[in-house]
Image: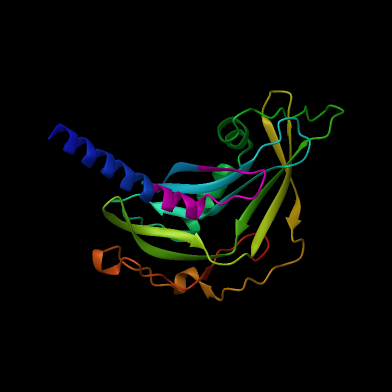
């Protein structure tokens, strides 16, 4: 009997790991040189699990980069009252904060040079994707919304970062990539989308792609 119980436990653990692995694979495919991470963030009283890709430049040789890698899961049973754009705006505002980037996301702390010194500031790039969709998924037995990107259209904001006399990070906007305005391949605005209620009958329901506005596509 004990051996049978051990087999059942092992089987359950295997199934659990497979489920987690399948979800992680969707949002963790980062380019070479980037590290996949999942961060939990409280936005408007709801917790979101956010898949990101991070590249840290420890010596400031080359740019440090971070972006949401097409995976934002609303952790049930919370139901958000915020529009999607407000959720992503808040998440981006946090990961664009140099203190969060260098002190939380990077396993080692890149040393930003003094703003009044001879060394060049650190370059940091933040990428935002322009087209998103929402899908109802089953998340550990509860139904919720999973937001993901649905095109390769993006806007990359470029900043320089240095440290002032008080030791605080100073961030200066340098431009965008692409530098000219972008017309995303998706056509609908977020307010035109009817987001499905996350019920057992709606699992698998997906919205059309809709626009997320950035500096490149105001």
Of 50 and 188, nearer the camera is 50
Left or right: 182 in relation to 53: right
Q: Is residue 13 above or below residue 130?
A: above
x and y percent of residue 45 in the render?
A: 36, 46
x and y percent of residue 113 in the render?
A: 77, 28
Say how many tags the image has. Answer: 0
**Quadrant of the drawing holding the C terminus:** bottom right
Of 44 and 15, nearer the camera is 15
x and y percent of residue 46 in the render?
A: 36, 48
Left or right: 144 in relation to 125: left
Q: Is residue 114 above or below residue 157?
A: above
Residue 199, quarter of picture: bottom left
Task: Report the residue that reaches farthest toward the right.
Answer: 118
- Does the segment drawn in magenta span residue 87? no
x and y percent of residue 168 in the render?
A: 66, 28
**Quadrant of the drawing holding the N terminus:** top left
Q: Is residue 67 above or below residue 137?
A: above
Left or right: 108 in relation to 173: left
Of 198 and 85, nearer the camera is 198
> The magenta stretch spans which residues?
20-37
């Amino acid at each position: 009997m004990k051996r049978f119980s051990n087999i059942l436990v092992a089987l359950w653990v295997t199934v659990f790991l497979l489920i987690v692995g399948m979800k992680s694979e969707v949002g963790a495919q980062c380019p070479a040189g980037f590290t996949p991470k999942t961060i939990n963030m409280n936005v408007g009283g709801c917790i979101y699990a956010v898949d990101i890709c991070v590249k840290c430049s420890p010596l400031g040789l080359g740019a440090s980069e971070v972006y949401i890698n097409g995976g934002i899961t609303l952790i049930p049973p919370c139901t958000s009252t915020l529009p999607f754009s407000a959720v992503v705006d808040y998440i981006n505002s946090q990961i664009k904060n140099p203190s969060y980037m260098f002190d939380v996301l990077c396993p080692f702390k890149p040393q930003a040079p003094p703003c009044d010194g001879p060394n060049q500031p650190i370059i940091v790039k933040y990428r935002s994707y322009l087209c998103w969709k929402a899908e109802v998924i089953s998340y550990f037995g509860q139904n919720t919304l999973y937001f993901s990107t649905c095109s390769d259209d993006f806007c990359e904001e470029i900043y320089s970062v240095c440290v002032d006399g008080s030791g605080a990070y100073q961030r200066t906007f340098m431009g965008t990539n692409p530098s000219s305005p972008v017309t995303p391949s998706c056509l609908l605005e977020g307010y035109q989308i009817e987001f499905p209620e996350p019920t057992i009958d709606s699992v698998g329901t997906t919205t059309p792609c809709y626009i997320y506005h950035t500096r490149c596509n105001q």
